[in-house]
Amino acid sequence: MSRVDDDAAVEAARNIDLVEVEDGYTLQNTPDDPVTEQHDTSQIPEMDVTEEMLRASATDPEVWLMYGGGYAQQRHTTADAITRDNVGDLSLEYIVQGGVASSMEGTPIVVPGDPPIMYQTNGPNHAKCVNARTGELLWTYTYNNPDDIHGNEGADSRILLCCDANNRGFAVLGDKVYMTTLDSGVVALDRYTGEQQWYTSTGDYRKGYSATWAPVVYDGQVLTGSAGGEYGVRGFVAALDPENGDILWRTYTTDPDRWVGTSWQQGCATTWMTPTVDPERGTMYCPMGNPGPDFDGTVRPGPNPFSCGTLALDATNGDVEWNFQESAHDVWDYDSSSTKVLIRDVDLRGETRDVVVSAGKTGWLYTNDAETGKLLRRSQETSQHINMWEMVPHADSDESISYVPGAHGGNDWQPPSYSPETGLVYVKQNNTPHEIFWLNSEYEAGTTYWGGTLNDWPHVSEPEGWNGHTSQVVAVDPVSGERVWTEWIDSENYLWGGSLTTGSGLVFLGTQESKFIAYDGETGDRLWESPNLGAPISSSPSSWYDPGTGKQYVAVQVGGSGWLRHGPRGSTVAVFGLEGDLSGQQGGAQ
Amino acid sequence: MTYETPQIDHDERRKFLKVLGITGAAAVGGDLAIGELREAADEPGPELAAMGEAIRNDLSGSLDAAVLETGLASIGTQIERIPELGAAGFPAADSTAYQELAEPVWTVHDALAEVGFLASAEEHLPPFTGEHIESTARALVGAEALAGTLLDSGFTEEELTTLFSGVATSRERLSLWMPTQAIPEGVEFDLEHVAPLHQRAMGGAALWIDDLDTYLWQAEYLIPEAQLRKGLWDVKEMLGGAALFTAAAHDIAGPARLSDSQLTAALTAGTASMILGQEDLTNDVYRLTDDQRTPIEGGEAP
């Protein structure tokens, strides 16, 4: 019998039902209390993670201590034991059988030691601690999300989820790991035992708030955000005390002075992915979601800052530094929610400067000056643009518009990666059309109000000029804006999740075809691919080097997730490894 | 560089004349000068006067004539600054030039919102139906005093025609902007947080103009000068709408030189121009496709 078959936390998570309701999804059969199951926790080396370790996470080949690998969110490991020449020998080391077939969009983090320890989360707020050398389960945990709908407490007092029971991973500091919860909270667990230490609600789930991203720890704070952009919430960014969960500061992302009337109170502009942090400046760069309501902009006139772009905040107190909007006053659900990539010392337009690269749903990459927010480049297109920003005539004629990128982008939340070796940013893009119908004549009390409705491919009129390709992997030079290489991937499922770059110039990513792929980052050639892993890959990988085994590992969660064509569920973490030496070239700042 | 006033094409001309009820020989020639159109256009429907009377009676005692008179003059002053902004090109990082344009609009907006004028306008005026726009256009063209207000504020005769034609021929776009009370209860967002239509138009216009200092500086790299020239007309369109709306409010507060029909026309057309201007601005300088942007190949070398 495998560990998951008699594991109480796994069983609790397995019992939770994700139920489709009129406005989205909700949860049923959640546990009354948090559930922790401990196995051989003695394998976890006692070594608290320090802020110094976090700052070095991006350059230390033996760790992956936060969602994006490091504060710059480059999703880059300096480990380079796996190379272009030997990647063909990469093989499966072990598979963590999760036992919970739910959303699998997370990135496992890895704390160094003997053995290294992996902390991994998936939906619905289920977590595991794993011996990263062997794959053995050390503890498991399931959070007790509220189950109000099960108690017949009414439609206005339940968890509402737009897009699945997602969770994208842990943050770590000291003896704790931190996870956001679907009821819009943050929970801290003892990383040695899996026992819950504290829980803080950051927003009222009864109003539509939820939380799905991996938080990030910086300067004595757990930085988190807000979700609920389809339910009329007011977006915010918040910082919590890592020791006790006290809210240290909160910045709302709709400024009353920049919205008409009180529309700011339901203006959304949520920030539902992990922020990027620049420790040198003390600045955080937040990915910004759509304004609310989604499709009827007439009730919220003006640009609707700080929606659909990048919001730079002072990471010590939340003061606004700058904001850049990629789709001001958006009415196509063009969030810019993927993590922003900070790149230092770029020579661009006559100056050496740090830049922030953003890949949003609009299907271009934006390169902004990290200090001022000034736009320096908008790349060549990373998806097709058909009927882009076209409005539809009034409903009387029952007209509609089919457009690319659809409401899933372009680039939805999928985090890009950056390779210092190639100087390229790698993005996973969708290219299927969506169709909007205006249905103003069909207003009915008590029904959802988008100002229209949305159809997903293939249930749309295919627009003239669409090339029939559904998704692609694209490498973009963020300095010149050039699209350097592209690989189209056609499937009935969408392409989801992020990528990873290595110190040897490789790019790893999973596809909706259940394959994990290694590319030559420079040329786009496929150098290696995994066996079929049994389900689409919707997650973002991580990598580390274990000096105890002399191997470099790459881990990826497997399973279809998300709000559209995600394909079959999965419940595993696949870990690949290859013995080899580091080049000794590691180090330096990112 | 200055701004670029859009040209009225054949299709728009045909629609404009049809809305005004001008047919036959009068529609064949002519350069669409407002004076000539005034002579040829049909009279507006009688319902406009009743609406104007209701608004006048509702709030005539609460408006501050001095604030509105100053506001109207200041909006005119700012409209006359637009060529200066065009000549200056893209703003510097610390520019407040566009925010200054919007300042008198905010002053009027705040004064009108405070006494409930914007809610009253929404209460007494209908949605942007074809009939209402038709009557509005006819009353607008016939109101010499309103034309004078705009001509005194830096509009040319040709621009006046363009502004009025835009209102008369944009029913489909305008009809998407529904009065708040026409949105049914029970929608997914809280109607309590939806401002009256006329406040959305005026506040939205001011917010867009405010945003230009930062946005144009940020996105200069992407925006061709030709698009900026169009955007500057859009700003003028919004400010022209604000001037019309303010003139109507001022008329209620004091001079009563406008007929009740003309009052309604000024409020409706002013609102429409503020709406159309903000939508046009987004399309001209914010939402740039690869065909519209400064070509990437033409940019500076890395």
Image (cartoon, rainbow, N blue to C red):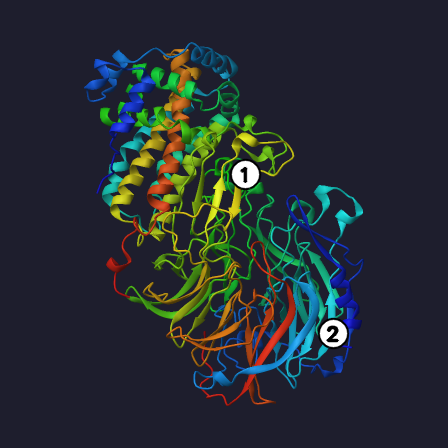
Res A425 → quadrant: bottom left
Please give the label number shown on residue A263.
1
Q: Earlier in the sequence, mark 1 or mark 2?
A: 2
**In the depicted structure, whether residue B125 falls above or below residue A480:** above
Q: Position of residue A292 (x, y in %)?
A: 54, 43
Instruction: Give the residue type that dot 1 points to.
Output: Ser
Looking at the image, which is closer to me, A484 or B115?
Answer: A484
Q: Chain of mark 1?
A: A
Few, some or many residues within 10 Å of mark 2 (<14, 14–19, 20+): many
Assign a secondary structure to mark 1. helix
Instruction: Give the residue type that dot 2 points to.
Output: Trp
The answer to whether residue A31 shows anywhere in this view is yes
* Gap in angstroms between the C-alphas marked 1 and 2: 46 Å
Quadrant position of the N terminus of chain A in the picture: bottom right
Q: Residue shown at 77%/69% (left/top)?
A: A36
Q: Residue shown at 60%/33% (left/top)?
A: B192
The answer to whether residue B154 shows anywhere in this view is no
Q: Position of residue B200 (x, y in %)?
A: 48, 32
**In the depicted structure, whether residue B181 falls above or below residue A536:** above
- Residue marked by disc 2: A139
Looking at the image, which is closer to me, B28 or A276?
Answer: B28
Quadrant position of the C terminus of chain A in the picture: bottom left
**In the depicted structure, whether residue B32 falls above or below residue A198:** above
Q: Of circles 1 and 2, which is in front?
A: 2
Q: Position of residue B256 (x, y in %)?
A: 39, 12
Left or right: residue A234 versus residue A73 is right
